[in-house]
Image (cartoon, rainbow, N blue to C red):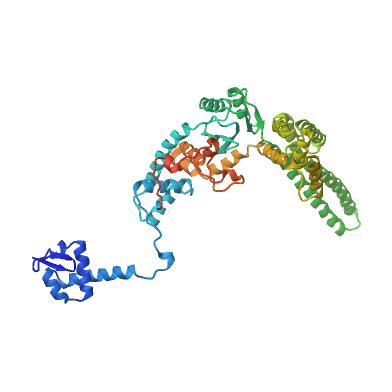
């Protein structure tokens, strides 16, 4: 026999023990609505369906609770924004994002999954396995990358736990083509990895590096026709360290003079006062020498940084003359502080041509600007030197007005071309130092999976898009995209995952 309640039929067998169990979802909904409507006593309804009145009331309460929740007035921040299909591949994507994007430790990932998702099946070993599988896929992507578009490379050696890591960065796109842990950093090691890169299509016009002997010897052996320019940052930094030392020493001499002056003022008219007066006179002479030396070396350091090694400045020939003048002045003052000045002077003297190699490239680019715009080269050079001036001074604007008169209707195009030429002439390997700061944040991975993590890290840094940059053309693009000029899938998709997209 079948009873009909609302639009749903109910199979009935009087007081059957399994009648309640046999009711489907739609039948339970109809039963709940019938009880809530009160069209018929619950006892009669239960008897006809072969269920207990308790069961009828339970279904009615469930329906009432559901209706109350559906029509409840919730605050906006408690409303469900969207739902996620949490699958095993999605969990793996979350693990990789937490480790690579958020720099989370393996135990932090485990705790996050347990806290936010109630997912307690993930262990530290499980996180390690996910990372290891990603390393293998990342290595395939790295090996398939086209390196033929790189022209200027920046090389350096960074250290992690006293182990050298060899680094190579494309100056234009910031693409990292070398990130390799090695046992040594000698000529043989550098030469091996540079030859390997050459076999993969890397063909550089020149490189920029510091004075590392193994690095330069390895490049000279592997790439004898590729010049290695010196990094101007290290030269400026080392001379700046000398300036700081001398200024601190001058401040110490000044303090010593002040102390002796106070002692002399409190002393009596006896032999002690005469001795203090002699000491004060000697201290004043040392103070004068220290102040003068610090002032002179500061001036030389400013000339080196703001005139000789600056991006906007005179021609290479003039820079060489100024450079030699600075070195000669250091030689004359070397005896006043030999343990500080002599090492820096020797470094500058030995690396002059490498430090000023960028100036020769800038000269060539400025000459090309003069030819392209049909402008005298000396005026292009004047516009270049103007870029080093201070826009907050009257001298700058007076010089600009003079050049505008000599270049009617052409000053703005010339200035734009000159600024582009300066920007395209790199002088330092600072991108490698920046990469070092990035790698240091992932050092915890080395303790878990070894040096292979560098392969995954190189893949991530090359295919992760810049959220912000001082150069607007880089924002929203990855180093790989900047290198090849082609868009590519998200880095998770390159690892074989399908990302979640909201409709």
Query: Closer to the camera, 196 or 389?
Result: 389
Q: Looking at the picture, how far across and down is residue 318, in whole percent?
A: 79, 32
Q: Looking at the picture, how far across and down is residue 497, in whole percent?
A: 39, 43
* Left or right of 341 in this view: 60: left
Q: Looking at the picture, how far across and down is residue 30, in whole percent?
A: 20, 67
Residue found farthest to the front: 409
* Left or right of 379 in this view: 87: left
Say above or below: 437 vs 316.
below
Figure label count: 0
Where is the N terminus found, in terms of image quarters? bottom left
* Left or right of 475 in this view: 263: right
Query: Closer to the camera, 454 or 281?
Result: 454
Snapshot quadrant of residue 43: bottom left
* Left or right of 365 in this view: 475: left
Going 37% across and 45% down the picture, which residue do you hit? 126
Please say whether residue 414 is visible from this viewpoint. Answer: yes
Query: Closer to the camera, 232 or 4?
Result: 4
Please say whether residue 123 is visible from this viewpoint. Answer: no
Q: Looking at the picture, how far across and down is residue 176, in whole percent?
A: 54, 36
Snapshot quadrant of residue 228: top right
Query: Closer to the camera, 4 or 24?
Result: 4
């Amino acid at each position: 026999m079948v009873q009909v309640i609302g639009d749903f039929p109910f199979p009935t067998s009087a007081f059957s023990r399994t009648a309640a169990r046999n009711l489907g979802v739609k039948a339970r909904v109809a039963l709940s609505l019938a009880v809530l409507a009160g069209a018929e006593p619950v006892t009669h309804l239960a008897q006809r369906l072969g269920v207990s009145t308790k069961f009828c009331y339970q279904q009615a309460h469930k329906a009432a609770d559901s209706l109350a929740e559906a029509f409840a007035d919730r605050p906006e921040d408690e409303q469900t924004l969207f739902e996620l299909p949490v699958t095993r591949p999605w969990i793996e994507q979350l693990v990789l994002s937490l480790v690579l994007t958020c720099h989370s430790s393996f135990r932090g990932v485990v705790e996050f999954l347990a806290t936010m998702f109630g997912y307690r099946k993930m262990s530290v070993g499980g996180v390690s396995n996910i990372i290891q599988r990603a390393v293998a896929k990342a290595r395939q992507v790295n090996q398939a990358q086209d390196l033929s578009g790189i022209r200027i490379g920046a090389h350096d050696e960074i250290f992690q736990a006293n182990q050298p890591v060899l680094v190579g960065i494309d100056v234009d796109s910031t693409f990292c083509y070398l990130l390799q842990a090695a046992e040594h950093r000698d000529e043989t090691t550098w030469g091996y990895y540079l030859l390997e890169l050459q076999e993969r299509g890397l063909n550089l016009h020149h490189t920029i590096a510091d004075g590392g002997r193994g690095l330069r010897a390895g490049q000279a052996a592997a790439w004898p026709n590729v010049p290695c320019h010196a990094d101007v940052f290290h030269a400026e930094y080392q001379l700046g360290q000398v300036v700081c030392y001398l200024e601190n020493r001058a401040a110490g001499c000044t303090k010593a003079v002040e102390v002796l002056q106070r002692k002399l003022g409190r002393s009596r008219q006896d032999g002690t006062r005469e001795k203090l007066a002699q000491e004060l006179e000697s201290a004043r002479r040392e103070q004068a020498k220290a102040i003068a030396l610090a002032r002179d070396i500061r001036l030389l350091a400013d000339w080196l940084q703001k005139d000789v090694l600056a991006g906007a400045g005179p021609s290479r020939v003039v820079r060489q003359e100024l450079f030699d003048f600075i070195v000669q002045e250091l030689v004359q003052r070397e005896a006043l502080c030999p343990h500080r000045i002599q090492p820096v002077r020797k470094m500058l003297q030995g690396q002059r041509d490498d430090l000023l190699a960028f100036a020769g490239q800038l000269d060539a680019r400025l000459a090309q600007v003069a030819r392209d715009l049909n402008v005298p080269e000396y005026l292009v050079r004047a516009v270049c030197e103007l870029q080093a001036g201070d826009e907050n001074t009257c001298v700058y604007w007076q010089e600009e007005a003079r050049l505008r008169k000599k270049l009617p209707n052409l000053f703005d195009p010339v200035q734009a071309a000159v600024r582009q030429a300066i920007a395209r002439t790199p002088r330092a390997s600072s991108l490698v130092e920046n990469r070092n700061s990035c790698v240091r944040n992932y050092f915890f991975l080395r303790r878990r999976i070894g040096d292979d993590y560098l392969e995954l890290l190189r893949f991530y840094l090359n295919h992760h898009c810049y959220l912000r940059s001082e150069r607007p053309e880089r924002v929203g693009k990855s180093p790989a995209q900047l290198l090849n000029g082609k868009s590519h899938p998200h880095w998770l998709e390159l690892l074989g995952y399908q990302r979640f997209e909201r409709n």
